[in-house]
Amino acid sequence: MFNIFDSSNLDLLKAEADKLLKKTLNRHVKLAVTGLSRSGKSAFITSLVYQLCEQSDARNLPFVESIRDSRFVGAKKIPQTSLHVPSFAYTEALGSLFDDQPCWPNSTRSISELRLAIRYKPEEGLLSQLSDWNTLYVDIVDYPGEWLMDLPMLSLDFAQWSRMMAELFENEPRKSASKDFIEKVRLLDLNGLENERLLQALSKEYSQLLIKFKNELGLSLLQPGRFILPGELEGAPILQFIPLMTGIASADLESIEPGTNLAALVNRFEEYKSRVVQAFYDDYFKHFDRQIVLVDCLDPLNAGEQSFSELQRSIELLLQSYDYGKNNLLHRIFSPRIDKLLFAATKADHVTTEQHKNLTLLLNNLIEKSRKDIQFEAIEVETMSMSSIKATENGFIDHKGETFPCIKGVTIDEEQQHKTVTLFPGEIPKDLPTGEFWQNNPFKFVCFEPPKKIDKSLAHIRMDHVIEYLLGDKLR
């Protein structure tokens, strides 16, 4: 007979009651899908929803514990609670992937949200006796990667930000690409009366340079991000400022003459921080529970040493902007904080299978400093290589009597023609590349198009690992 007053049974009941309380307060997860531009955020969100709603079986997602244990009931997309935020274009994204000539979903150009309801059976215990199933609500927020790099600006004043940008512009490849702009900024009369037309022209030229740095030079530390994707702020004076290339001390900002060009630059910079960056942070970033940081290591490796080094610095800067800390129950009620963080090296399908381990090791080394700081705050951190939607097939080729691994996929040539190619794109360095390493330029990572989906399935690499890490403990 079960004796409720037995000490061991009381301990068991207490443990189950605590578990029930935690379940009651943890049926909602706000997931930050974070990454710099072109890291694959839209493809990731599309795949995440499709895997859970349409392909949630043990063959496709074997590492999701609730699916493997037959406790996963189902998932579906439901109306979001933030009615003022546009919905993530999930149907359109699927349409692009399942088209007769499939293509990748459109890049993110503004803020959007999507909500999932996941129904599951709780594990054995008191909770399973009280309910046949539970529902976990997952809110996913998508936003342009360009906007992400604005967050580090919150800790800088105009003088500090100008010095940081000036240092960047002193180095190649920025220096050669911006000689004319730098000279115009140096000729600007800071103490002269505000010349709105001139400031507008300089800010437009600066915006065009940022777009060139992104599209042609493969750089990532691009501020302000709204200069690249302004959204509803297109043409607003709040986006009409530039960094100074001549250097200015923070103390000088205390004695600025009103009505001058310098006063206008400082005022617009501070307004941008307050009305755009801080507001965005307050509305979205500081409310996340879980975070995945998608990192494309391949394009920066292709672009060269400066691009890869800038990727590392960008990650370090943006991670300083997040609120990390142990997510206990009181924190969850009053101030939710990120308690699990996943760094994912995307486009694992763009390299051969035996290179996946090196890709993960490279990412580990890329974020080593940030990872140590975060783990110091008792945050659970994981890294892995993955592909949201697998675009290639693995195989082998014979060359001069030797067998080499390869990948096969469809790419677009210079004439915009779809072409099937088979290649070995190169070995991924497991350590951070050194100066001598870059001289060899051993990489040939190409962009592949998504394959035709004859059976309406989305193949992936380790999406089940991603789902289990980010949501698995909430589905128990």
Image: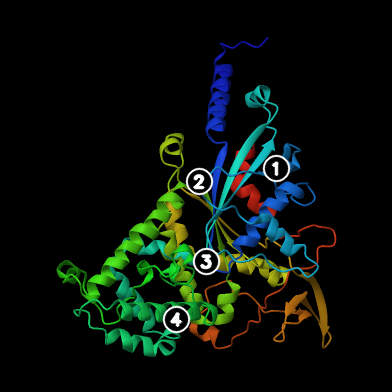
How packed mark 1 is, by other alpha carbons closer than 10 Å (few <14, some 14-19, many 20 or more), is many
Q: CA distance from mark 3 to mark 4?
A: 18 Å
Q: Nearer the viewer, residue 68 or 169?
A: 169
Q: Nearer the viewer, residue 115 or 267?
A: 267
Residue holding disc 2:
289
Q: CA distance from mark 2 to mark 4?
A: 36 Å
Q: Earlier in the sequence, mark 3 or mark 4?
A: 3
Q: Earlier in the sequence, mark 4 or mark 1?
A: 1
Disc 3 marks a residue whose amino acid type is Leu
Q: Earlier in the sequence, mark 2 or mark 3?
A: 3
Residue holding disc 1:
75
Residue at the image point whose x is 54% and y is 84% from the top: 438
Residue holding disc 4:
209
Disc 4 marks a residue whose amino acid type is Leu
How packed mark 4 is, by other alpha carbons closer than 10 Å (few <14, some 14-19, many 20 or more), is some
Residue holding disc 3:
36
Q: Tell us which disc is closer to us: 2 or 1.
A: 1
- The image quarter containing residue 257 is bottom left
Q: Earlier in the sequence, mark 2 or mark 1?
A: 1
Q: Earlier in the sequence, mark 1 or mark 3?
A: 3
Disc 1 marks a residue whose amino acid type is Ala
Q: Tell me where residue 42 appears, x and y as whole percent.
A: 62, 61
Q: CA distance from mark 1 to mark 3?
A: 28 Å
Q: CA distance from mark 4 to mark 1?
A: 44 Å
**Relative to 387, is 436 on the left or the right?**
left
